[in-house]
Amino acid sequence: QSLRGKEKIYVYDTQEKELKSIPIERFYHNFNKDKDRDRYFTISIDRLTGKPVLGKIYQAIRHQRKNKLVEIKTGLGGKICVTDDHSLFTLNENGEIIEIKPSQNPENILSLSSFPIYDNKKNVDVTDYLSEDLYVKINDEYIDLRCNSHYHNKLKIYIPLTKEFATLLGYYVAEGNCTPTSVFISCRDDQEKENIAHLVKTIFVDETTVTILQKGVRFSGSLYSSLFKKLCGNGAINKKIPDFILFGKDEIIKAFLAGYLSGDGYIENKNKIGCSTISETLKSHLWLVFTKIGCLPTIKDKDRSKEKIIIKGNEVKKTHLQYVLTIGINSFDKVYFSLERKEEERKKCLERFKNKPSYKQYDQRRYDYNQLKPLIKKIFGAKISLKSYPLSVQWIDKIKRRVNNSLIGLPNPSVEGVGKEEIPLLFKKLFIFDNVQPHSDLNSSSMYFDIRNINSFPQQILAKNIIKKQIKRLKNLKSILYKASNLLPVEVIDQKEIKEQDRYVYDISVEKYENFLTTDGLLAHNSLFLDFNVHLGVPDYLKKVPAIGPGGEYTGKNYGEYEIESQLFLKALMEVWKEGDCNKKVFAFPKMDLHINNRSFEDPEQKKLLEYACEVASENGSPYFIFDRDDISLASCCRLRTRITDQEMITHPEKLRFAGIQNVTINLPQCAYRAFSNRGISDSSFNYSKMENIELFFEKIDQALHLAIQAHLQKKKFLKMMMVNSDGALWEIGKIAEDGKPYVDLDQGTYLIGLIGLNEAVQYISGDQLHESEKAYKLGLKIVSFMSLKCEEYSEKFNLKLSLEESPAESAAGRLAKIDLQEFPDSKKVIKGDPEKDEVYYTNSIHFAASAPLDLITRIVKQSKFHPLIKSGAIIHAFVGENLPSPESIYNLIKKVWENTQCSQLTISPEFTICNLCNKVSRGLTENCNYCGSKDVYGVTRIVGYYSKITNWNKNKIGELKDRHSGNYKIVVSE
């Protein structure tokens, strides 16, 4: 399931340019109201490389809690509260990032050991952080306060992001506060006051009024006050670090910490540097900046509620938690103090540390890479002792350097030409022993290898094979160590069930990476975009295939012998899909891709299941009816479909995998505008079959196809480059897997050619939309036939598996329409939607207009004639809105579609209104809840090929939704 609502996550807001620490529950409610799906990002890791990245958040989710909530605490002080079935991460003995649940009682879970995300900003534009009604531009260099004031307010527009500016911000975060007209930084040390005053004068304009007071330094100006409040917060509980520091270079971060630690930092027991804050956001930001420069801080929460202070003679309780962060002596060389007396103390402590024997050096480690020891030992053998190795980040780096050095300067391109004199040198360089036993990891032959017999030709051949295997193992270890060095397996020191078992738990979906970091630095899994390809019985091609059971072991039976069990399982799955979540809300994921063939209607048991699936479709539209016509296919994403032709994959389904490498979409209306630029849509005498422009139109499509192919070839080359070496970002999926093939084979992947706006292209050329005349419809078929044939031709020519796909085009449908409105004014005659409300769009792929008045049967019959030409996925939606079609009518529709059309996929797509107050679900889209009358509601329906909240849609999809309501999608099918 998910996280407790109070659990905080990192959210980078691209509009406000701020990395926020937000309770996931609050983010869920805010995200519902935000229509810009490109706005929010979170910190994730790339599971292939282990590197931190910013991943886009595309969904926020709330579940009713079904499992108990547990709190996990780590040795570095991090905490996370999740349901006991929610996946966290750890490393296994092969160095792979794997999921692990609290119910499995993990010994350690993953955090980050580094945070190498940089934006390389050189200047800070203060107008990005100040309200426009506050200032007026004097010229290109300065702004001033909009209203008159006797305080000086002149401020540079662009402040260079220097170490001096970073240090000043560090001082402010530690000891600063703002009044409406000034900034004050508290300090007692006279030299420190002079330093702060000098920083202000250096960074800002010379006329800045700076006053050195008994308790600190003040510089005046409402603009300064507003800027520092926005950048760093005001008041101890609101303090934070600006985004340009968090994503800045290491030298900028160290300069910030020099100022901050000079104010709030201290040295404890000559072996720790500590600091404390009551700001949760600042705690999470400090954890990030320390981690970014490799300091690995420990966090402790200090409850101050029992502490009492005296203010003006009155006893007052402290109510805020205090967060204490410390770094060990082994990190003293990575930070420094601006304050001279503290800096001198740091240097003395560091000098003592360096003079100590290594076994006496203090390290506040509560993490370990012990699971990697067998893997390292396997490569190095007795050439390395791991008993005395505390497998810290530093030791992992040392081993990584040893491995890397061993792979430098190897014979290129192979070892076949190596002479017998070089073999002993290579053995030493690659950590291979002089004697290698037969039938071992390095020597699979039955021959014993002895370096003393290297003059023997068979021994030379064997030596070269051993060298090749060791190089392969070292490259694999290098990749594992590079991944591990970005991660930190932190020790779990406590796990307990919490008393407050909240009703709801929360999750987010992160595009591509499927994980996110909490503000205590712990990685959690997220909700996925998943498809379940389900069949009403065991497919014929699987019936005689040996079945694999638990543990990857063959059961002794074929899959066909498990048909009854598979049907029981499918029925149980469909019951869950029909019921929805705890509030009867339809599941967005996993999608139910239900495969239909002849036996679906002939076999009594399959027919019963299909009839039940039609009940589910009537209830909430969950099934995607996939029509399998004489081929083997898998469905995924919005509509992507892949035919499986590899006989080995068919007979060994455990090897099934496919990849749509990239989709490049052709803007068909723009091809029409370019070809028919000299005529208008109102030309009633136009006959496209006699116009030479039609040939030019097809030329424009052909040019676009060539451009798309070039994009595919460039992408393929770039991806291949990242798969070649073990330090490549995609090496893990490009290397040879256990079955002898790479997990992703770029030569076997599908390179998709999408299309958009066929309806508008035809309308611009012929004057009619696809549904308005037979000539327009036939022109549409001719265009798609041309593209399909060209894909086949170019597949052979360029050695790429090219295939047409209906582009989902959630954003492209609107973005391309807006571009064309600017570049081709005539486009306004065919583009759909309301331009006054910025809701313009092109009709999806080959679809008929959403508002077309033709009945559903005609829509399906005509639209499905395009489907055989679109090999990688086409779909028809029955947007039934608030209507509740009967299961019987849906069954008849599915049967008729199977028997009388070439339709690939069909969905029944209703609409729902969900109340945030009472959580009830109503059929149709309404402004008020039908049960409690609340206006705090949101709508759900299919945006393209999956259900999502309408509040998250962009404006072009809102425009399409309005047009759907004008269309005729009523299901009326006779027996």
Image: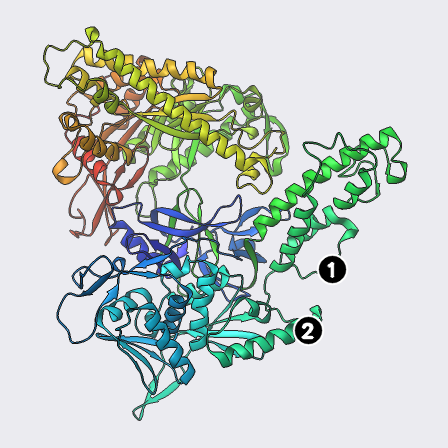
First reached walking from the N terminus: tag 2 or tag 1: 2
Residue reaching furthest to the front: 206
Of residue 578 and residue 623, the one placed in the foreground of this image is 623
The picture places residue 370, in percent across and down from the top left corner, at: 65, 56
Q: Secondary structure at mark 1?
A: loop
Residue in the image at 29% along x and 91% along y: 312
Residue in the image at 61% along x and 34% along y: 737
- Point out which mark residue 355 bears: 2
The picture places residue 615, in percent across and down from the top left corner, at: 31, 31
**Can residue 175 be seen in this snapshot?**
no
Q: Amino acid at mark 1?
A: Lys
The picture places residue 799, in percent across and down from the top left corner, at: 49, 19
Residue in the image at 15% along x and 48% along y: 928
Q: Answer with the quarter of the image where residue 145 lies.
A: bottom left
Residue reaching furthest to the top: 690
Q: Amino acid at mark 2?
A: Asn
Q: Answer with the quarter of the image where residue 17 lies.
A: bottom left
For residue 239, above or below residue 292 = below
Q: How many marks?
A: 2
Residue topped by disc 1: 387
For residue 223, above or below residue 558 = below
Q: In screen coordinates, is 475 left or right of 257?
A: right
Q: In screen coordinates, is 935 left or right of 24?
A: left
Q: Residues within 10 Å of mark 2 (few under 14, many from 20)?
A: few
